[in-house]
Image: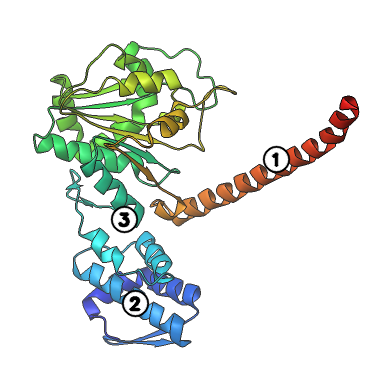
Amino acid sequence: MNIPIEHQKNVFGELDVYAKRIEKTLHVTLIARGEEIKIIGEEGPAAGAGRVLSTLADLAARGNAITEQNVQYALALAMEHREKELLAIDQDLVCHTISGKPIKPKTLGQKSYVDKIRENMIVFGIGPAGTGKTYLAMAMAIQAFKNDEVGRIILTRPAIEAGEKLGFLPGDLQSKIDPYLRPLYDALYQIMGAESFQKNSEKGLIEVAPLAYMRGRTLDNAYIILDEAQNTTPAQMKMFLTRIGFGSKVIITGDQTQKDLPSGQVSGLDVAMKVLRDIEGIGFEFLSSKDVVRHPLVQRIVEAYEGYERQQEARAGRRAQRSMRRDKPAEGRRDS
């Protein structure tokens, strides 16, 4: 196959790191002579490598900087002969950051998530860390705000400590709650810019507040994002969902595996998923470790924890079954 010289460094990576990843994963050998690329290996893997390289070359031709995540995901899709779907994902531009970097979905799960946000009034984005739940929701909100589709943006999350007691925090009320809301500020600054955020915040058009501040309000013509929803109580979740007014859109994000609630406390996100799953106008998108777009090591960490938790659940199930079998004869003796 042929890949233009000007795209080869982008496709193969610095010091051919991407090419080596393709060789190692598919057990093939890549040899480049000018624009000609020779792929040596068994027919199936060699064809798969050709499809991956072709897809990456097409992405490069569109002006994309190929990343390790692109290569990993193209390889994963190649196993299912779906690598060309990566090109369809790339066509969906959400917005640009303040530095001009395009924000696009990077996986099929993220593309489905963005589509559901466009189609539904309320969307639950549920999945592990690094899947872009909050970042994409923020990008969609800022784009809608810039297009005058909504009059303001409201960002909120439960102000709950992540497994440790922070004690007394100095300063005024805003200084006390800012540490809990820092991830939202980080995304706002990157997409919108600090100056634009400050200007709109002073006008009351962009509001970042803890969830407790939502009680008693009716939120019309707004884009509302509830982050870290796994840390809400059922009462808090109900309170939040009943704040929604006309012309508003709501995105609720959460990771069911990272709850910081007190032991025994039911999560409002878990309850909402059961109560609202069949209501028209509410969409649910379940992202997985395949949708992690941070460093590839994060994806492997998420997968390792998922495997460990499945093992723990299986062991707990076996212990419960053994306990039931031991109890049954005793019940029979008491009955007799």
Residue 106, numbered circle:
3
How far is mark 3 from mark 2, CA to CA?
18 Å
What type is the residue that disc 1 sits on? Answer: Ala
| Image location (x, y in percent) of residue 81 | 38, 72
Residue 107 in view here: no
Of badges 1 and 3, nearer the viewer stands: 1
Q: Identify residue for label 2.
A: 51
Name which of mark 1 and mark 3 comes first in the sequence.
3
Which quadrant of the figure has residue 4? bottom left
Question: Farthest residue toward the front?
Answer: 336
Whether residue 232 is situated above or below residue 90 in the rendered picture: above
Residue 300 position in % (x across, y down) = 52, 54
N-term mark: 3 or 2: 2
At horizontal 51% and vertical 48% (from top left) the residue drawn is 302
| 3D distance between C-alphas at marks 2 and 1 | 44 Å
Q: Nearer the viewer, mark 2 or mark 1?
A: 1
**Taking 327 as reference, is 136 left or right?**
left
> Quadrant location of the N terminus?
bottom left
Residue 68 pos. (x, y %): 38, 62
Dot 2: element:
helix
Instruction: Look at label 3 and name its amino acid.
Output: Lys
Q: Residue furthest left?
A: 148
Residue drawn 30% across and 51% down? 112
